[in-house]
Image: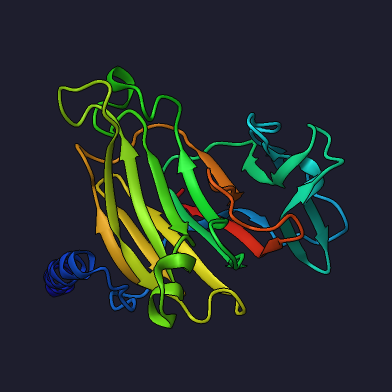
Amino acid sequence: MQTGITQKIMAFFIGIVTFFSNLFGLPLKPMGQKLDLTGYELVFEDEFEGDALDTDAWFYRQEGLPDGVHNAASQVSVSDGLLKITAQYREDGEFGPGWYSGMLALNQRYRHGCFEIRCTCAPGGGFWSAFWLQGDGSYEHDISRGGVGAAEIDIMEANCWNDGGTVKRNAVTTAIHCNGGDDNPDKIDSKRIGAFRGNDIYNTFNTYGLEWTEDEYIFYINGVETARSAFSKGVSTAFEEVIVSLEIPETIKHSKDFTTSMLVDYVKIWQKP
């Protein structure tokens, strides 16, 4: 009982600090409880051994996007125990000239559990590394129902490169997106949970995790809690895609010789029996 009370007090304290962090635009250092995997079993693990992506486990997602930006299998490689996703401009790209990057998702969908990635984030401009979940109908009012039917859960997005200053740059953001939180079916309901500091995230491997229970989402960096939420009307009950991506910005201001890469050491998922 004492442990439960302590966790609630800590969660309340973190919530207050996160509110003021978001208010003033300053990323937080993870300060919550440590991830406890007691009672969980490892149900998926890819440490990217070998020299090719395991397409029995993964598929290439959203290939050939329009308007001169494309996701493509050619931007994904595996070697030396690492998954590498590269963003670059290609005149000879398979979908025509344009900016190319990569997006992967697991063939199997999951509901509840602990999800973790160990990676370095891609530096430079508006390109950002991401690890996230997405359920069918996340943005549809009658399906999502305020996130209960499906939601987008952004475990981490490394989109702080342009925020200025070393402290802000060395951070990732966490967010939840759904629909049906209010009566407006055309409005996506979004909550920025916060920005949280990692350890030299562009040059050093960090872990980013989510514990998705029946009651809430709990987010972690390097095994330490950053925040928790059940936005907006409760947690998703859908089986959701697990996605790793190097996102392409809508407006690219780089010269065509610019390139950047995200490196992934592993992706792991634990669930309770």
Q: In the rendered view, would you say 48 is above or below 74? A: below
Q: Quadrant of residue 136?
A: top left
Residue 205: image location, x then y, percent? 60, 75
Q: In the rendered view, would you say 40 is above or below 216? A: below
Q: Quadrant of the N terminus?
A: bottom left
Q: In the rendered view, would you say 272 is above or below 235? A: below
Q: Nearer the viewer, residue 202 or 205?
A: 202
Q: Is residue 109 left or right of residue 19?
A: right
Q: Is residue 42 left or right of residue 146?
A: right
Residue 253: image location, x then y, percent? 59, 55
Residue 227: image location, x then y, percent? 28, 64
Q: Is residue 264 left or right of residue 75?
A: left
Residue 36: image location, x then y, percent? 39, 69
Q: Nearer the viewer, residue 62 or 8?
A: 62
Work out which residue is located at the far top of the displayed protein and give it. 142
Report the residue at 57% width, 56% height from top. Answer: 127
Report the residue at 51% width, 55% height from top. Answer: 270
Figure disc tally: 0
Report the residue at 28% width, 32% height from top. Answer: 148
Q: Nearer the viewer, residue 1 or 81?
A: 81
Q: Quadrant of residue 78?
A: bottom right
Q: In the rendered view, would you say 151 is above or below 37? A: above
Report the residue at 69% width, 62% height from top. Answer: 261
- Residue 37 seen in this snapshot: no
- Residue 103 seen in this snapshot: yes
Identify the coloring: rainbow
